Image (spheres, rainbow, N blue to C red):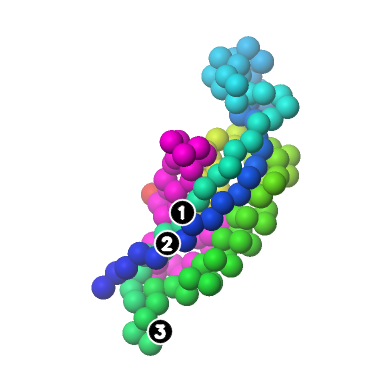
Amino acid sequence: MRVTVSRKAHFNAAHRLYRKDWSEEQNDTVFGKCNNPNFHGHNYELIVSVTGEIDPQTGYVIDIKVLKDIITEEVEEPFDHKNLNLDVPEFKDLNPTAENIVVVIWNRIRRRIDSQMDLEVVLYETPRNFVTYKGI
């Protein structure tokens, strides 16, 4: 019997969407206000879901405290109140779009979750705009 366990989290971060190899004009056309050279911020919301078999001894798929600690260490501490472009190494040469952020978060968490379990991350950039990544 496979069950999904989910945990919500959040972080606040600034970013700028732009490509170094494009002109300012092209960046403005594609990214609009998100290309602000002084950056802009979001209050990101995150849902991390782990799906797996229930352990017959503990009754858990994953201990929610363990999942909480992984999210804290892999997402909240390195991303919260940071400038993603400048402070998070993965975005040195990767445009920090919501799509790229969710993949980076998934990869950070994936390495800490048992490979027998499925992982899904949903990232809300705004209450109405969100992306989902399942590793496929």
Q: Which residues are magenta?
A: 107-135
Residue, x 53% and y 72% (percent of image)? 65
- Give the image location of residue 92, x and y in percent: 69, 39
Q: Is residue 11 above or below residue 53?
A: above
The residues tagged by marks 2 and 1 sit, at their Cα atoms, a distance apart of 6 Å
Q: From the viewer's perspective, is 132 left or right of 81?
A: left
Q: Quadrant of the N terminus?
A: bottom left
Residue, x 48% and y 43% (percent of image)? 124
Assess disc 2: are there few (<14), some (14-19) or many (≥20) residues with their C-alpha within 10 Å of its C-alpha. Answer: some
Q: Amino acid at mark 3?
A: Thr
- The dot on residue 58 is 3
Residue topped by disc 1: 47
Q: Is residue 36 visible?
A: yes
Instruction: Report helix, strand or loop for mark 3.
Output: loop
Q: From the viewer's perspective, is 20 left or right of 56?
A: right
Residue topped by disc 2: 6
- Give the image location of residue 93, x and y in percent: 66, 37
Instruction: Report helix, strand or loop for mark 1.
Output: strand
Upstream in sequence: badge 2 or badge 1: 2
The reply to whether the C-beta atoms of the residues labelled 2 and 1 are less than 8 Å apart is yes
Residue, x 71% and y 24% (percent of image)? 37
The residues tagged by marks 3 and 2 sit, at their Cα atoms, a distance apart of 17 Å
Q: Is residue 90 visible?
A: no
The reply to whether the C-beta atoms of the residues labelled 1 and 3 are less than 8 Å apart is no
Instruction: Report helix, strand or loop for mark 2.
Output: strand
- Give the image location of residue 4, x and y in percent: 35, 64
Which residue lies most toward the bottom here?
57
Upstream in sequence: badge 1 or badge 3: 1
- Give the image location of residue 102, x and y in percent: 51, 46
Assess disc 1: are there few (<14), some (14-19) or many (≥20) residues with their C-alpha within 10 Å of its C-alpha. Answer: some
